Image (cartoon, helix red, strand yellow):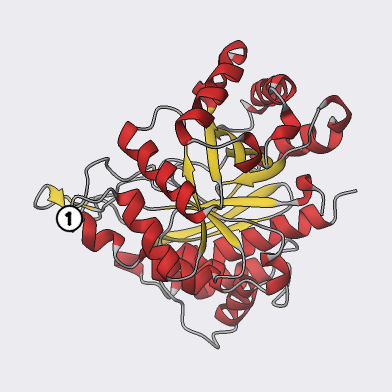
Amino acid sequence: MAEHQHYVPFLKGRKGEFNALAGLEDAARGGMTPLIEVAPVPWDFASERPAKTLEAHLQPFAANVATSWGTARPVFIDLTWIAEDTLASGVHPVTSVLEELGRNDVQAIPVTGMGRSDLSIAAIRDVIAKDDRGVCLRLERDDLRSIGALEAELEMACRDLNTAPGNVDLILDFKDFDSGQAPAIEMAAGLALSALPTPDAWRSLTLAGGAFPVNLTGVRGEARVPRADWEVWRALAIDRAGELPRRPAFADYAITHPEPEEVDFRMMRMSANVRYATPTEWLILKKRNVRDHGFEQFHDISAELVALGEFRGADFSAGDRAIQDCAERSSGPGNATTWRMIGTNHHLVTVIDQIANLA
């Protein structure tokens, strides 16, 4: 498989995303390498303190990865949202999480980036030396503003990690942008890819971005959001492939915004909604808040979606099968976690299908 036919979905490491991975068929798994972020420690707004200790927050993560993704294929693991404080035992969170993943036989590849702390870099350097699986280096938009300094910065990063480019999976992550910003992002990404020093030296190369909105506050009834991240990648890796020294793989944030949103549920009333990827857009169907009107609204949302031409049919993915069952009321309406699983699973299979069918 050519590199540009590979998919790197960025997932938030919450229950809905883990369930979405668990529902993938083996054929879809073979076309992707997920990047799973350890979610931030939840905040208790009532008591104005973390809802749990860092130890308790990290405890189920490795088992969740092993159960949902398995041990047959590699997976990128990023602790970017976890505070740099060490655990009560004195162990760095990176060390703790990667060691526990190893005990679960997960083929975990640690993720790092420019500007991470010396403690984090040291912990990842130790993991690289011990596991011999290499490392993923995630460059963000600010890291790519000075193309002239990029070669020196990458050399320094490899020195700090005591590794070589051939052991590094390089990701250029342009984070959040919308369709109006897409032309500028395409230009910036094209310049970065063209100016990348020794492009063939890296173990893999991936272009990432996230165009899903931060929340659905402004959505009423039905909305369609352009999948601008996919369009930028396709414009570069497919339409302008001849201009690039190396065609990158595709990465996105599935059906979430790149930045995790901390929500005070005492103040917010979640509405029943589905986020459904089409080849060019996210189709969003939204009803009223579930606190006052119940989760039963998902039956109606499912029936509306099944009636639309964009619905791919129950055999397309586990998410689509769940939508069909909900529409026919042969299953319950589920809850917010259920619908995050459904939308994410459908999205992952949609992207794999698109990549497989590119001319």
Q: In the rendering, at what x and y percent does residue 138 appear?
A: 53, 36
Name the foreground residue: 147 vs 179.
147
**Residue at position x 25%, y 55% in the image:** 265
Q: In the rendering, at what x and y percent does residue 102 appear?
A: 44, 64
Q: Is residue 315 visible?
A: yes
**Residue at position x 40%, y 72% in the image:** 295
193 left or right of 293 in image:
right
Q: Residue furthest left?
A: 47
Name the foreground residue: 26 vs 240.
26
* Local SS, label 1: loop
Residue under label 1? 89
Residue flagged by tag 1: what amino acid is it?
Answer: Ser
Name the foreground residue: 17 vs 314.
17
* Picture quadrant where residue 275 is located: bottom right
20 left or right of 179 in image:
left
**Residue at position x 59%, y 38% in the image:** 209
Name the foreground residue: 267 vs 140.
140
